[in-house]
Image (spheres, rainbow, N blue to C red):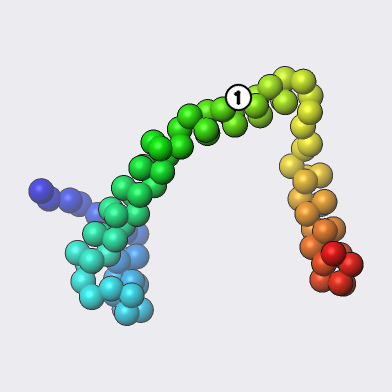
Amino acid sequence: MTVTLTAEQEQFITEQLKDGHYRSAADVVAQSLGMLRAQEEFIRSNMTELREKIAVGMEQIRRGEVVDGKTVIRNLREKLQQRERGGQ
């Protein structure tokens, strides 16, 4: 099998080798494929639960039980600042 990489992909592999994370380009590709396989297996094995959670979320949206993203980020930042001040 022959695989053609983009310039960006080749640069990433080169950086991984340069940083000493892998011994060869084949090692980088093997690790990447292993991670992809693990991700696919996780999704497959958790598909039912994921679909159920999506259905719950969609129902919450339908009922208007949502908070916009800006509010969520603001609330998270406030909680983080409280923790940093020791207020947890």
Res 84 seen here: yes
Amino acid type of the residue that numbered disc 1 sits on in the rendered structure: Ala
Along the line of sight, which residue is nearer the eye, 48 or 85?
Answer: 48
Along the line of sight, which residue is nearer the eye, 58 or 56?
Answer: 56
Q: Position of residue 55 (x, y in %)?
A: 60, 24
**In this picture, residue 82 sits left or right of residue 9:** right
Residue shown at 21%/71% (left/top)? 24
Q: Residue 70 occupies which quadrant of the picture?
A: top right
- Name the residue tied to disc 1: 55
Residue shown at 72%/20% (left/top)? 62
Q: The residue tagged with tag 1: helix, strand or loop?
A: helix
Task: Assess disc 1: are there few (<14), some (14-19) or many (≥20) residues with their C-alpha within 10 Å of its C-alpha.
Answer: few
Residue 71 vertical placement versus 52 (above, below): below
**In this picture, residue 5 sits left or right of residue 69:** left
**In this picture, residue 30 sits left or right of residue 88:** left
Q: Position of residue 19 (x, y in %)?
A: 35, 79
**In this picture, residue 75 sits left or right of residue 16:** right
Q: Image quadrant for the C terminus?
A: bottom right
Res 7 seen here: no
Residue shown at 87%/72% (left/top)? 85
Residue 33 vertical placement versus 24 (above, below): above
Residue 54 vertical placement versus 73 (above, below): above
